[in-house]
Image (tube, rainbow, N blue to C red):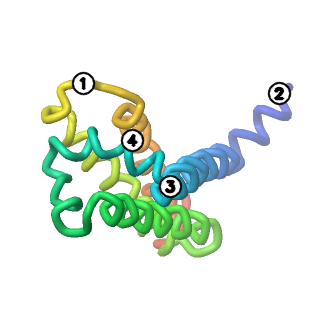
Amino acid sequence: MKKFINVYIKSDYDIVILRLSVIIIFILFGTYKWFDFEVMALKPLISPTWLNILYIMFGVHGGSYFLGIVETITFLALSIGFFRPAAGILGDIIVIVTGLVTLSLLPQLGKVDSFVIKDVLLLGAGSVLLKYDLKNYLNIKN
């Protein structure tokens, strides 16, 4: 057990697991944005908030598709980030911005639900991944 712990401590397994977890979240939510059930589920969450600008600009379906495109770019950048830290940095920043944008809706929504609460965790995950990718990009050793 001690050997396993030492191997784990010296590895990047935690970052790999975290990156894969965030990628899966963005694959799921990004893919959902293209389907009518998600378009309709988002409508009552987005309509009363400042993000309603997406509906004004693109319509209800177009607003959902826009979010789907952003989330697709995010999971692609995070995936490429396994091999190219610069792409990972882009993905990490979008994860953080996504979390901040979604959490900024809280005062207007007046309630906390799964649509919003996942973004608390995404802020932390994005920050950890950003630090890791910046260190790799700048070639900084621990």
Amino acid type of disc 2? Lys
Say if residue 134 shows up in the picture: no
Q: Earlier in the sequence, mark 3 or mark 2?
A: 2
Residue 36: give x, y in percent of width and height. 46, 52
Q: Are marks 4 and 1 in contact (CB under 8 Å)?
A: no
Residue 132: give x, y in percent of width and height. 51, 57
Which residue does the numbered mark 3 point to in the structure image? 35
Residue 119 horizontal side relative to residue 17, left or right: left
Label 2 environment density (alpha carbons within 10 Å; few <14, some 14–19, many ≥20): few
| Residue at 40 percent of width and 64 percent of height | 65
Query: Which mark's residue is nearer the viewer, 3 or 2?
Result: 3
| Residue at 54 percent of width and 47 percent of height | 25
Query: Which mark's residue is nearer the viewer, 1 or 3?
Result: 3
Front-most of residues 43 and 113: 43
Q: Secondary structure at mark 4?
A: helix
Q: CA distance from mark 3 to mark 4?
A: 10 Å
Q: CA distance from mark 1 to mark 2?
A: 45 Å
Front-most of residues 90 and 46: 46
Which residue does the numbered mark 2 point to in the structure image? 2
Amino acid type of disc 3? Phe
Residue 115 horizontal side relative to residue 11, left or right: left
Q: Earlier in the sequence, mark 3 or mark 4?
A: 3
Residue 130 horizontal side relative to residue 106, left or right: right
The disc label shown at residue 111, or none: 1
Which residue does the numbered mark 4 point to in the structure image? 41
